[in-house]
């Protein structure tokens, strides 16, 4: 098995995090025998990988040209695995994990040319790869009309227990003045369809006393020179922004929060809610298919465009310690199915089926 390591060389914590965590889980299961990672010559993975996994810098090209021209040759007759959403367009013996489906699920988030280009990439991938993996049934249904007749689309639900592999770093709470204070979490930035603007409006309308809003993001809002005008939000004195929190800091924030409010523009996958559930954090979310698949009965829901209903669910949760305890218990129970070891087991079974 050859693993496409192109995006692992860029050090991004987004889609590449899926590859990092899956590879680590496969290594714990002893499933990486004979596997190696290919990267463009002159580069190395910037995300941690198991020491036992060989990394081969090879090829004549870089970037997309390397992926399309060098990578198929390096894979030879073996299986090629693409964890990060892009892949060679003219290779049958490969598996592709498709994570970005904005062109299908939320086309309004993209410009016309971005939408056309992403749709064309999806068509090329689905026309060639023997197996496509998505992170929700909703994503699989969206891809179904584009698939070839002999192609399989499999689903691996987004795990979130990577945050539990190290102790929570509660030092993040001090500079934010969060110790002993009630706060609601929102996310933005690299998470698909970041939803913090809607949550800010919601908090402003509710006017909840002594309740802070904490936004986790990979970008500093004060440095976003080209962002679109935003609707009036909550009192800035009642907001905190955490830029690029470490996994240990995210764990501390989830564990200390009253809840996570997640209202994305679309949700082909749901990393934030999976992380929250694994940390025992209650979730208030919009009733999008992928979120329902991940959370089940371990969350409170409102319709996607119904901000008053979302506000009502948040007020209901914050006003009931009994409901909060029930949701925390339900989150921990649901999280038992959202582990990387379980995902790696299913991935291994899929690989065995494809090899037959």
Image: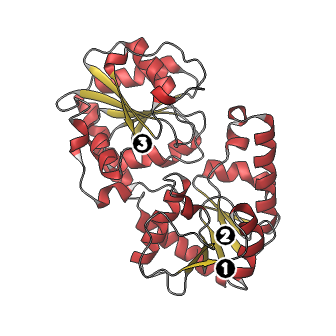
Q: Quadrant of the N terminus?
A: bottom right
Q: Which residue is mark 1?
A: 79
Could you tell me how far apart the alpha carbons at marks 1 and 3 are, in whole angstroms? 38 Å
Q: Position of residue 56 (x, y in %)?
A: 58, 80
Residue 43 placement: quadrant: bottom right
Q: Secondary structure at mark 1?
A: loop
Establish if 333 lies above or below 49. Answer: above
The mark nearer the N terminus, 2 or 3, is 2
Residue depicted at x 57% and y 55%: 135
* Position of residue 295 in the picture relative to residue 122 (left or right): left
Residue 84 placement: quadrant: bottom right
Badge 2 density bin: few <14, some 14–19, many ≥20, Cα 10 Å: many
Could you tell me how far apart the alpha carbons at marks 2 and 3 are, in whole angstroms? 32 Å
Disc 2 or disc 3, which is closer to the eye? Answer: 2
Q: Secondary structure at mark 3?
A: loop
Residue depicted at x 24% and y 55%: 167
Badge 3 density bin: few <14, some 14–19, many ≥20, Cα 10 Å: few
* Position of residue 344 in the picture relative to residue 137 (left or right): left
Residue depicted at x 50% and y 25%: 197
Establish if 299 lies above or below 133. Answer: above
Q: Quadrant of the C terminus?
A: bottom right
Q: Position of residue 89 (x, y in %)?
A: 79, 65
Q: Which residue is mark 3?
A: 297
What is the tally of numbered marks visible in this picture? 3
- Asked if the residues shown at circle 1 and circle 3 are in contact, with their CB atoms under 8 angstroms apart, the answer is no
Badge 1 density bin: few <14, some 14–19, many ≥20, Cα 10 Å: some
The mark nearer the N terminus, 1 or 2, is 1
The mark nearer the N terminus, 1 or 3, is 1
- Asked if the residues shown at circle 1 and circle 2 are in contact, with their CB atoms under 8 angstroms apart, the answer is yes
Q: Which residue is mark 2?
A: 95
Report the residue that reaches farthest toward the front: 42
Residue depicted at x 30% and y 23%: 212
């Amino acid at each position: 098995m050859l693993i496409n390591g192109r995006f692992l060389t860029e050090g991004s914590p987004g889609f590449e995090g899926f590859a990092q965590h899956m590879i680590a889980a496969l290594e714990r299961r002893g499933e990486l025998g004979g596997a190696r990672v290919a990267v463009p010559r002159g580069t190395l993975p910037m995300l941690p990988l198991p020491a036992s996994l060989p990394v081969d810098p090879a090829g004549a090209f870089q970037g997309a040209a390397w992926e399309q021209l060098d990578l198929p040759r390096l894979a030879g007759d073996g299986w090629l695995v693409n964890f990060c959403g892009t892949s060679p367009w003219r290779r049958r013996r490969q598996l592709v994990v498709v994570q970005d489906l904005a062109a299908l699920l939320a086309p309004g988030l993209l410009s016309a040319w971005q939408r056309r280009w992403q749709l064309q990439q999806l068509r090329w991938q689905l026309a060639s790869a023997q197996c496509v993996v998505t992170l929700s049934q909703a994503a699989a249904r969206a891809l179904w009309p584009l698939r070839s007749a002999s192609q399989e689309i499999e689903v691996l639900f987004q795990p979130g227990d990577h945050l539990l592999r190290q102790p929570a770093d509660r030092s993040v709470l001090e500079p934010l003045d969060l110790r002993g204070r009630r706060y609601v979490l929102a996310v933005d930035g690299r998470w698909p369809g970041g939803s913090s603007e809607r949550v800010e409006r919601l908090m402003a309308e509710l006017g909840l006393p002594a309740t802070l809003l904490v936004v986790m993001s990979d970008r500093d809002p004060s440095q976003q020179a080209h962002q679109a005008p935003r609707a009036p939000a909550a009192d800035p004195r009642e907001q905190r922004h955490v830029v690029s929190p470490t996994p240990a800091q995210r764990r501390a924030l989830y564990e200390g929060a009253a809840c996570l409010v997640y209202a994305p523009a679309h949700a082909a996958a749901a990393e934030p809610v999976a992380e929250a559930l694994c940390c025992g954090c209650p979730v208030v979310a919009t009733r999008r298919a992928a979120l329902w698949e991940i959370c089940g009965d371990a969350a409170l829901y409102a319709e996607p465009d119904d901000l008053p209903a979302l506000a009502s669910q948040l007020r209901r949760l914050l006003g009931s310690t009994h409901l909060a305890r029930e949701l925390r218990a339900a989150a921990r129970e649901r999280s038992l199915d959202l582990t990387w070891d379980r995902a790696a087991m299913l991935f291994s079974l899929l690989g065995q089926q494809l090899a037959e």
